[in-house]
Amino acid sequence: MAMSDVCDFQGLLARFQVRATPLRLAVLEALGSASRALRAKEILMHIKDQRRVNKVTVYRILEDFSRRGLIRRIPAEGKAALYELACEHNPPHPHFQCQTCGAVECLEPVSLTRVWDEIRGPLGHRADRLEIRVAGLCRRCRGRGGEQ
Ligand SMILES: [Zn+2]
Ligand SMILES: [Zn+2]
Ligand SMILES: [Zn+2]
């Protein structure tokens, strides 16, 4: 089941006090209908199927959404960052990045309570999130003999 079937994007925007425009909804729909995190270019392609859009506007929406916490921006080493929904249906989870092909995969959420408690620190900072990225060699690249 795609997340866009269970997510209430209008409600999500309202909760974050963002006005629901067709383009903002289309960005969330694109992210919700994918089974993995998407690069800005892929989101753009998805939306372009249905309407004419300005690339800069879409990029600005992505930036704004990730700053507000509606979506998560996943940095990828040597590749464009990826985006995914950050609603209650998609709790924070670690990501795996293949060091050969650069592919990024979402991993199952794990309990990071202990790590979080220890890392949060007494420095007077306000910690908002914890990101874990696992680097390695993906199954496909291993099969291709990419393993040394
Ligand atoms: Zn959702
Ligand atoms: Zn790979
Ligand atoms: Zn993910």
Image: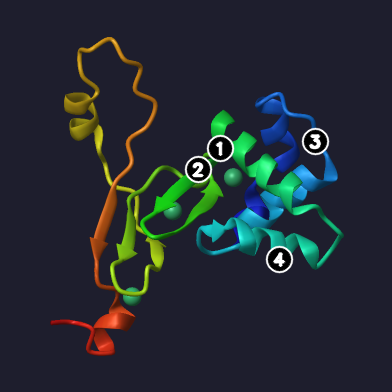
Residue denoted by label 1: 66
Q: How far apart are marks 3 and 4 (CA)?
A: 21 Å
Q: Which residue is drawn at 68% across and 41% down?
A: 60
- Local SS, label 1: helix
Q: Determine contact: label 2, label 3, CB under 8 Å.
A: no
Q: Can residue 96 be seen in this view?
A: yes
Q: Quadrant of the N terminus?
A: bottom right
Q: Determine contact: label 1, label 2, CB under 8 Å.
A: yes
Q: How far apart are marks 2 and 3 (CA)?
A: 19 Å
Answer with the quarter of the image where residue 51 lies: bottom right
What's the amino acid at mark 3? Ala
Label 2, residues with CA under 10 Å away: few <14, some 14-19, many ≥20: many
Q: Distance between the residues labelled 4 and 1?
A: 19 Å
Residue denoted by label 2: 72
Residue denoted by label 3: 20
- Local SS, label 3: loop
What's the amino acid at mark 4? Met
Give the percent coordinates (x, y) of residue 62. Answer: 63, 43
Asked whether, in this view, residue 8 is left or right of residue 90, the answer is right
Which badge, 3 or 1, is on the more N-terminal residue? 3
Residue furthest to the right in view is: 52
From the viewer's side, name the closer residue of 61 and 20. 61
- Vertical comparison of 120 with 84: above or below: above
Q: Distance between the residues labelled 2 and 4?
A: 19 Å
Mark 2 vs ligand 3: CB below 8 Å? yes
Answer with the quarter of the image where residue 21 lies: top right
Which badge, 2 or 3, is on the more N-terminal residue? 3
From the viewer's side, name the closer residue of 98 and 77. 77
What's the amino acid at mark 2? Arg
- Local SS, label 4: helix
